[in-house]
Amino acid sequence: MTLREIIRYAGTLYGANILASVITLGMTVLLGRDLSRTDLGLYGLFQVYFLFGSYATSAGLPSATVKWVAGRTIDDGEFLHFILVRLTIISVILYAAAAAAMSLGDLILGAALAALPAFHVFNIALSAARARLKRRTEAGLLVAASLSTSLWMFIFLLHVQNQWAAIGGQVIGAYTTALLVLIVALRWNLPRPKRPGNWRAAFWRTARPVFLGSTVFAVGDLADRVLVQRMLGLKALGIYVMALMLFNVLNKPIHMLSRVLLSHFSQAAGGAPDAGAIDIARLNLLVLPFMGLTAAAVLPRLLPLVVHRNYAAAFPVLAVMTAVIVVKAFELVHSTLAVARDSAVSNLRAQCFALVTYGVLIVPLVREFGLLGVAWAVVLRWLSLAIFQRQDMLGRGVQVLPMGLLARAGTMYMAALALFSIAPWWMGLTYLLGGTVARLWSIPQAVSFVSGRI
């Protein structure tokens, strides 16, 4: 894809994610009003189990699907047979684990495990749509997923005002979305399944390090919530979960963009037109951090009007966590390049290094700064990941971005974020002007982007 095509595709996803985020934000407000901090903390535990399970049981299939389908190097019928068999095996294992957890009395873990088969159907379908550049289909499914989950949560909230309203809504919403995916798939004229050929070994060479890296990442996410609960209590976990829910609204377009870039770089590896990684990174550093600073300025002033004051402590935590966005704007280019260039092991090694760094920092930071310490530990974890990842890719001969790009963007972002408590409305403008002075981008390029001339 050219840069214009990437912007068009990402713009469609941004539009869908804005709508989905509005829906999700509205549901977050309702949960914040109707659930206690303890209930929200228990819902946070469900999310921990669900997130960890989504990575640990994916077998790396979503990312490998994007790479191999976008590259058009395997027969569609063979790939369909391969995916259906793997999804069936994963689902049987998950249902058995869910039944075991519920029989042992851990209903929250059981609910998370039971929701995962439906999530995997949805996630792999999205990956296939993205690989084939079906941007309208993907955007529609994203909105439908947020709408169905929020609708079910709202229905449950009418009957119960505890953690099961949120958990039940997410579980039933996952199956509603999976059913919608199957209905849409029937309109794609799917090929007849065939027995897979000799490409499976190469597929697993892509999927395996992606899977292991994702699992290592999920271990870190599991650790911070468990540590908050143990060191600061369940009510503090509820505040942290609120901050994470708000951050995840910002993180959605970044997550989707990473898969667009994976499709782009995978096609480019086969000789398709290749927009430069440096141009993509500069565009990311222009748009994504500005979104984070805008959210850090607006949400603490807007949400207290509708969310219970018990959650006021979540907003400083959110402001610190938005610094992750500037790192991700740089890192996601490297992550997708590594997978597309068959060097996904760089991502795995970087995740392991970042987890060790996080493990060393998290306890002293929490003891010193409480929840803000957790947020800073997360930021430093992502920063260490980005630095190690770049160096590992450089050693493997894979194209990398100049480190000065991240250093200048990070400096400008921290300068802007320092205005959070005294002049929040100036943060976004400070970052844009600082980025211009630091030559992260030029004003003419920014005007061309906004006017659609790129």
Image (cartoon, rainbow, N blue to C red):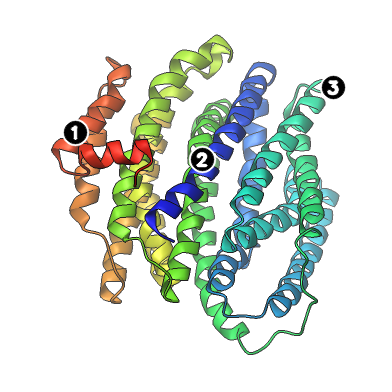
Residue positioned most to the left: 437
Q: CA distance from mark 2 to mark 3?
A: 34 Å
Q: Position of residue 141 (x, y in %)?
A: 68, 46
At x 66% / y 80%, what residue is drawn?
A: 75
Q: CA distance from mark 1 to mark 3?
A: 51 Å
Q: Position of residue 354 (x, y in %)?
A: 37, 56
Residue flagged by tag 1: what amino acid is it?
Gly
- Crowding near pointer 1: few (<14 within 10 Å), some, many (20+)? some
- Crowding near pointer 2: few (<14 within 10 Å), some, many (20+)? many
Residue to which mark 1 is pinned = 434
- Nearest the camera: 89 or 191? 191
Q: Position of residue 188 (x, y in %)?
A: 75, 61
Helix, strand, or loop for circle 1?
Answer: helix
Helix, strand, or loop for circle 3?
Answer: loop
Residue flagged by tag 3: what amino acid is it?
His
Q: Earlier in the sequence, mark 1 or mark 3?
A: 3
Q: Earlier in the sequence, mark 2 or mark 1?
A: 2
Q: Position of residue 366 (x, y in %)?
A: 39, 36
Residue 83 vertical position relative to residue 117 in the rendered view, above or below: below
Contact, mark 2 vs mark 1 (Cβ under 8 Å) = no
Quadrant that contains the N terminus = bottom left
Foreground: disc 1 or disc 3: 1
At x 68% / y 21%, what residue is drawn?
A: 35
Contact, mark 2 vs mark 3 (Cβ under 8 Å) = no
- Crowding near pointer 3: few (<14 within 10 Å), some, many (20+)? few
At x 57% / y 59%, what residue is drawn?
A: 133
Q: Report the disc number at residue 159.
A: 3
- Nearest the camera: 148 or 190? 190
Q: Report the disc number at residue 14.
A: 2
Residue 241 vertical position relative to residue 184 in the rendered view, above or below: above
Quadrant of res 305: top right
